[in-house]
Amino acid sequence: SVSILYCGSPILIFSIIFYLNTQMSGPDGFPVFNLYVRTGLKNMWYPCGSFKGDEKSAALAQNYVDDGLLASISKNQLDGGVAGSLFRDKERLEETVVRGYPQLRKERGSLEYGYKLSFPGLNKEQEKMNVVVIKKQEGWFDGIKNAFSGN
């Protein structure tokens, strides 16, 4: 059990809870995607939430961890999945971000997103920030094209 002392800053509390929740994958072994946002100045990443993957993302993450022949394809598919998920909820996500970080309000519409993957076995390089270009995933063909192109 963790006790949190309220210090008067909801952003500080959010950051502490975010930090505590992002230290491992979910108890069920599914990967956790910890989301961040930054302005075009690229000077600071702000935590803005996390979501847990499913069976498919767990298989992709495991292949990425194993660093085998298809690891880069798995990584590209993870990036594409995050980009597609963010695309579907981009307006609501940006509203939440600027409510939590009022200093980003002027950058609304031009924010950049990234994620850190939490999954057992990742090396230091794999734990680094992954910048994501938010775009709609059109279908199966786009998924295959993105898997091989790195987009």
Image: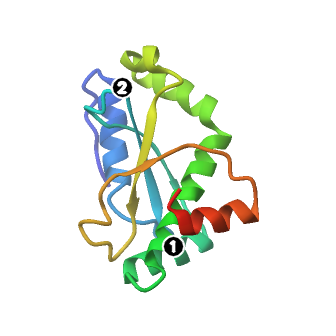
Q: Residues within 10 Å of mark 1 (few under 14, many from 20)?
A: some
- Give the residue number, with chain letter if any, for mark 1: 73
Does residue 2 appear in the picture of this structure?
yes
Q: Position of residue 69 (x, y in %)?
A: 44, 85
Give residue 122's quadrant in the image. bottom left
Q: Amino acid at mark 1?
A: Ile
Q: Position of residue 120 (x, y in %)?
A: 36, 74
Give residue 80's quadrant in the image. bottom right
Residue at (30% x, 41% y) in the render: 16
Residue at (60% x, 67% y) in the render: 54
Q: Earlier in the sequence, mark 1 or mark 2?
A: 2
- Give the residue number, with chain letter if any, for mark 2: 10
Q: Position of residue 58 (x, y in %)?
A: 53, 73
Dot 2: element: helix
- The residue lying toward the viewer, choosing from 116 and 71, is 71
Of the 4 image quadrants, the one containing the N terminus is bottom left
Mark number displayed over residue 87: none
Q: Distance of mark 1 from mark 2, alpha carbons?
A: 39 Å
Does residue 28 appear in the picture of this structure?
no
Q: Answer yes or no: do the residues labelled 1 and 2 have beta carbons within 8 Å?
A: no
Q: Is residue 110 left or right of residue 24?
A: right
Q: Is residue 21 left or right of residue 133?
A: left
- The residue lying toward the viewer, choosing from 111 and 59, is 111
Q: Amino acid at mark 2?
A: Pro
Residue at (26% x, 65% y) in the render: 125
